[in-house]
Amino acid sequence: MLAAALLLGGARDGATDTAPQPAAPAPSPSPSRWTPTLSLRAAQPTAFGLSLAVTIGADEPSPCPGHSATGPSASVEGGTGGGMIGVGYGAVCAPTPPFGLGGLAVRAAYARTWGHPWSTAPDQNYVGIYGDVSVLLTLRVGVLKHVGRSAPGAKDWVFLLGGGIGF
């Protein structure tokens, strides 16, 4: 009888139960955060203006105090010399949105000139790419190519260079 009990598993000599354990739940993705920022700018060709940008990113730990986001980014700006919209990828640190502490972005852009644009004629269309880098003050560099009908004084290429306060 003792032999039968040992053979049937009544005594296991210190063996542990190896029944499968339920798998740990997979971590859920972090919710997206929309982080808006405002900037006062002076840049070609839009001249003096105001910009509103939104960066959408996961709410992840970061060294940034307050809100931060890394992901798709879009901007709209209007100035005394034209307007521009941009879509691309960015990273922003905004402790108290809409006032950004710092960030960077690369965006494809469409610009339309009016009024008194810098470096070209009014009523012109441009497409191109630009980058913004900011730590309280923003530096913008990029290039725009003229598209559509040309007017006297319109440039085929406009090289963006500008700055501002905010991101």
Image: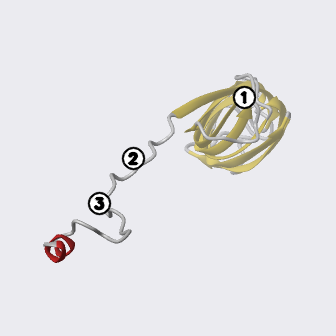
Near mark 3 (Cα within 10 A), the count class, few <14, some 14-19 or many ≥20, is few
Horizontal arrangement in the rendering, residue 161 relative to residue 130 (left or right): right
* Residue 158 can be seen, yes or no: no
Query: Would you call the spot at circle 1 few (<14 residues within 10 Å), some (14-19), or many (20 or more)?
Result: few
Mark 1 or 3, which is nearer the eye?
3
How far across and down, in percent of the image, does residue 19 sit? 29, 60
Quarter in which the N terminus is drawn: bottom left
**Which residue type carries mark 2?**
Pro
Query: How far is mark 2 from mark 1, CA to CA?
Result: 29 Å
* Distance of label 2 from label 3 (alpha carbons): 18 Å
Which structural element holds mark 2?
Answer: loop
**In this figure, which residue is indicated by the disc labeled 2?**
25
* Element type at mark 3: loop
Q: Nearer the viewer, residue 43 or 105?
A: 105
Marks 2 & 3, CB-CB < 8 Å contact: no
**Residue 71 horizontal/vertical position (percent):** 58, 44
